[in-house]
Image: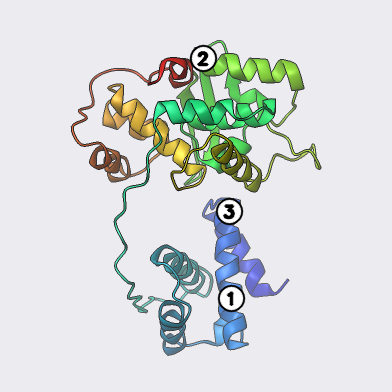
Amino acid sequence: MTPLRQNMIQAMCQHGFSPRTQHSYLYVVTALARYYRRSPDQLKVDDLQAYFNYLVQERSLSAASCRVYLHGIRFLYLQVLHWTHFDVPLVLPKRPQRIPELLTRQEVARLLAAVTNPKHQALLSVTYGCGLRVSEAVALQVKDIDGERHLLRIEQGKGAKDRMVPLAPGLLRVLRQYWRACRPMPWLFPSNLLPDQHLHITTPQKVYHQAKTVSGILKGGGIHALRHAYATHQLEQGVPLHELQQLLGHSDLRSTQRYLHWLPGVTPQNQGPADLIASLGGAG
């Protein structure tokens, strides 16, 4: 490991970056070094500008991918190499504004019913029933379930933040049935090959796509659609926007407000989170 890479890892740990963010930032810095075949500490502003132009014009990376490169490289030069400023503009193509194909409650019910493996069904159920990111779902431990208080602890979610989300009775029953059948420990969803580790995020993604195929759902999108479904279904049940923000773990309310734009005519009311899993049987 080079001293520069070691210093960058140390700086990211000091800033509390998640392992996934650290991996992304190291990847983009490594890609930069390989492109120029030089250490990044030997590059100048003009080199960086030319590299960003290459990413946009020749590689045609999406705006989101370009931003990951920008943030990772900016962190290197400001926090590790201690440049006084980072004056390298990144001109991106305008990000398209698209509304995802939102799942109905009936479609979620069909999707969950198509999964026969108890672990996989519990995994998709908690992802939808608590509105989790896939990285949060696979990292759950059995001790995170507070059955007495009906709460689920999400440890170090996006932005290195812990949060508690309500665990509805319908979902708690599903998780208890799964635990009695499989007795996982300590991870709620351990890897089959490496039981001392949790599932990799690619497993639930594959399970979701397989279930979607079996259930005949043609709408696009990956497993993150279950988190979108949770948010939209809770809004339809009258959950206030600020409360939904806390449930989803959004730092910025604007991230939560987009769901209102996707649901014209829906007005949040002063109601608590709904038991979405229990209500699936009557979804129409």
Disc 1 residue crowd, few under 14, some 14–19, many 20+, Cα 10 Å: few
Q: Nearer the viewer, residue 108 or 143?
A: 108
The residue at the point 55 percent across, 64 percent down is: 25
* Residue farthest toward the front in the current orientation of the protein: 216
Direction from residue 117 to residue 220 in the image, left or right = left
Q: Position of residue 183 (x, y in %)?
A: 76, 21
Q: Of the residues tagged 3 and 2, which is closer to the observer?
A: 2
| Mark found first going from the N terminus, 3 or 2 | 3
Q: Amino acid at mark 3?
A: Arg
Classify mark 2: helix, strand or loop: helix
The answer for how far apart the CA atoms under marks 1 and 2 are is: 47 Å
Residue at which label 3 appears: 20
Residue at which label 1 appears: 31
Tally the marks. 3
Quadrant in the picture for residue 270 = top left
Image height check: is 252 above or below 9? above
Residue 54 seen: yes
